[in-house]
Image (cartoon, grey):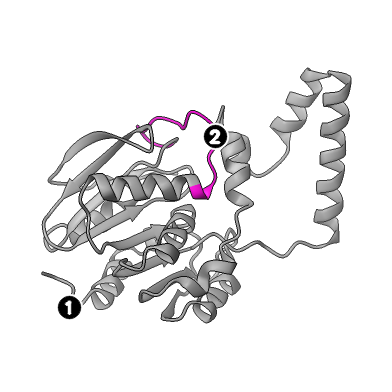
Amino acid sequence: MKCFSVTIDGYIMQGIFHQTKTEYRHTGEGRDVILLHGWGQNMTMMSAVEQHLQDRFSVWNLDFPGFGESDAPSEPWGVPDYTAFLEDFIVQNGIKDPILIAHSFGCRVAIRYAAVHHDVHKMCLTGAAGIRPKHGLKYQVRTKMYKVGKWALKVTGNTKKLEELQKNSGSADYRAAEGVMRPTFVKVVNDDVTPVLKDVQCPVLLVWGEYDEAVPLWMGQLMEKEMPDAGLAVFENDDHFAYWHQADRFNRVLDVFLKGDVK
């Protein structure tokens, strides 16, 4: 994916959060805003939002552990681990009543954090992952055959064939993941936030691409229904990266949502 460059008046910093060295940037002053990127991405993908908000807000843009310039976790993490990481990041930086703006995987972390920490002021979630997809019989049979094949190769000690099977199976994100991030990916995608949606008490703006194939629109509609105070904005003729493709429009929608929050 090609990323455009933006000019940011801030310094790249490093810190140890949840026992993991993390790279992040802090710009601006005012109410705290935390930007949480998607899987396989880094803070660059949130730079347009950062640049737009930095003259009115205190903006924190970070590389999640395992992405960008941050270290990978020492062991496979699930969404609860990334949520604990966010908790530590917020505490160590003295962040109060934050606004969370997240994309895709970052939304899983934001939702789980906000479901417990009701001091979250507002959230904007775009292309929010976290709801278990509906799979048909073909998918279930294919998954079962993969698991049986994997088990058989492990039992027989055929490590070469096992590596080939794992390399050629799964999603593009799974195949691209290396080392500890591959089992981390498995744990992350199997996390379902549906049961905690009702516990998110803050106002939530959901932004979705009409033709999002990674996280279909019906998931956004379900989130809007299950969250107590949520509204859904649909970007027509766009996909999972609608916030990126239509950055100006996304920022204008943000301005309306955050009106009155400038200190």
Magenta residues (range): 67-80
Res 250 quadrant in image:
bottom left
Circle number at residue 260? 1
Question: Would you call the spot at circle 1 few (<14 residues within 10 Å), some (14-19), or many (20 or more)?
Answer: few
Q: Contact, CB < 8 Å: mark 2 with mark 1? A: no
Query: Which is more toward the observer, 55 or 5?
Result: 55
Point out residue 93 in the picture as x, y percentages from the top left corner.
22, 47
Mark 2 lies on residue = 181
Name the amino acid, label 1.
Gly
Tell me: residue 111, above or below residue 46: below
76 relative to 144 in the view: left or right:
left
Query: Judging from the image, what secondary structure is the residue with disc 2 in?
Result: helix
Res 11 quadrant in image:
top left
Point out residue 253 in the picture as x, y percentages from the top left corner.
30, 74
Query: Which is more toward the observer, 138 or 191?
Result: 191
* Residue 115 included in the magenta stretch of the image: no
Q: Quadrant of the N terminus?
A: top left
Name the residue at 35% across, 50% down: 87
Sequence-first tag of 2 and 1: 2
